[in-house]
Amino acid sequence: MRAWLTALLSLALIISLTACVAKGPGWTSAPSASGSPVPTTPSTPSTPSTPSTPAPTNASGNGGSGDQASSEDVLPTLTPKAQLQPVPAGESNVAYAPNVPPAATRTEQAIVEVHFDVVEGAQAIDPNGTQYTTWGYRLHGDDTVTTGTPGPMIRARVGDIVRFTLTNNGAMPHNVDFHAVTGQGGGAADTTVAPGETATIEARLLYPGIFMYHCAAGDVPQHIVQGMYGGILVDPQEPLANAEHELYMVQSEYYTTTDANGALITDRAAVTNEDPTFVVFNGAAGSLTGDNAPKMQVGERMRIYFVNAGLNLDSNFHPIGSHWDKVWQEGALLNNPLRGSQTTLVPAGGGTVVELIAQVPQTIVLVDHALARAFDKGAIGQIVVTGDANPEIFEGFPVAPSTAEPSPGQTEAPSETPGEPTTPAPSGEPTPAASGTSFTVDIPAGAFTFQPDGAADEFADAENPADYAPNVLMVPLGATVTWTNNDPGMVHTVTAADGSFDSGMLAAGQSWSYTFDQPGDFDYTCTPHPWMKGRVSVMMH
Ligand SMILES: [Cu+2]
């Protein structure tokens, strides 16, 4: 019934893990427990020194395996570094957004090796393919990735050592500050690498949770708004219960202006003034809508590991049409989750872990509920839920017709119904077929008839003569609209005023479809007959 959705079900979006740990060169023996520094080198890391074998300690500094950590102490008892082994074969610790590496099945602490490259390159940051140069991180040597925003998600367990290596393929110095790391600058000082250099740190993961990482080199605000951020998940000793789906989301901001050639460049003053042009999930408007929307079935649970990279804005993270069944506030997994939240606040430089349950078929819309960021700047995602309806939880009914007489010249306002969206019925026109998220617009006989610009009935459905009918179509986000040219012998187009879509020439009898992945009002016209005008209003729900 929702053709455009079912066509997408073949996409494995959520847990299709494609990456495995990138092993750094030259690491064949366990490094010193005393943590001898690993110097920055232009090629490969130095050979670690001979291991020693101290007794286990806990992270509070209480030495000795016999010591009992106090009840106030939430830190894990640490297995000495020299006794740690690499993660077992088959364990994956990294994945590209929106994927999440599977949870480790081991109970022992281990050494998790991760190797990133810095990569600078142009990427599309909206569905129109608008190009913007970002700086970011990719898995070492993955030449198929030319940009790295957001950086890959890292997954390890509390008590693990992350042995992290950074190679700089960029054009200026970069580094990584891990919010999960206890040590100078979260590792930033010791991972700072000039172009061509490689550096390694080893850091113990002391607290479970979802943590941001980011570049802290040079003009730090610019390195972050340019795209240098990602998330590291540290699982607790007692793993969270299984969820059918896990999703990695990063919210962030782009601050742009255009240069003399029309290309997007960074507006550094706007960064200072905290006035972003784009607010996006996973590096681009549209990264989690339409064809890219995650799918789930009624009865399933989804857990979202969410990082708010900022730079400047707090996020007001809300699932339209659902609830956060669980929220681990600030992503702090040592704590019990809050239950039944509507909107959770995620500070810049912070994270959250949330879960929702698919109760009824619908498209859940994920937003920053400071909604100008969603409607105007791109902070929208979708989760498409399919399965059986449940009237015990939700049921919609047809809208009763208005009893009021419309005043002369009044535009018939499209109405929003609970449940299934409807197409507003134009007076004097047959009601176009609408099913689910599919809508139709007729280009009737005589649509080409000239009308002066600015006619009072231009966007009225009683427009005479009619050009596009219905003239104003209100649809939910993700809807597919099909225009059919029924004007005998005439060629028409459906051409967006903002250039976002264009049918090309439609001969009589031809149809053309477009799926609306962004909310807003989309005015369109016919190129050969520019007095023909229509509008699609795309709502979030
Ligand atoms: Cu940087």
Image (tube, rainbow, N blue to C red):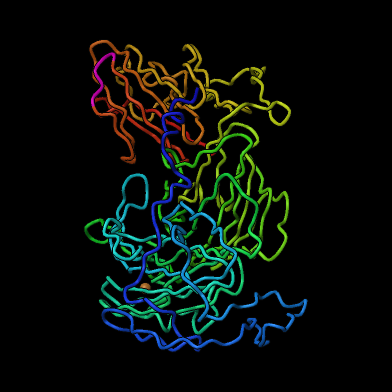
Q: Quadrant of residue 494?
A: top left
Observer-nearest of 412 and 488: 488
Observer-nearest of 317 and 210: 210
Magenta stretch, overall SS: loop
Observer-nearest of 446 and 24: 24
Q: Is-magenta flag for residue 340?
A: no
Where 140 falls versus 193 (above or below)? above
Residue 432 in sight in this render: yes
The residue segment tinted magenta is 505-509
Q: Is residue 506 left or right of residue 312?
A: left
Residue 306 in sight in this render: no
Looking at this rendering, what residue extends furthest in the right direction? 71
| Residue 293 on image: x %, y % | 47, 41
Q: Is residue 265 left or right of residue 342?
A: left
Image quadrant, ligand 1: bottom left
Q: Residue at x 57, y 87 (%)?
A: 54
| Residue 239 on image: x %, y % | 63, 59
| Residue 456 on image: x %, y % | 44, 26
Q: Quadrant of residue 107?
A: bottom right
Where 178 falls versus 496 (above or below)? below
Q: Which quadrant holds the C terminus?
A: top right
Q: Residue at x 51, y 15 (%)?
A: 427
Q: Is residue 362 left or right of residue 479?
A: right
| Residue 255 on image: x %, y % | 40, 62
Q: Residue at x 41, y 68 (%)?
A: 114
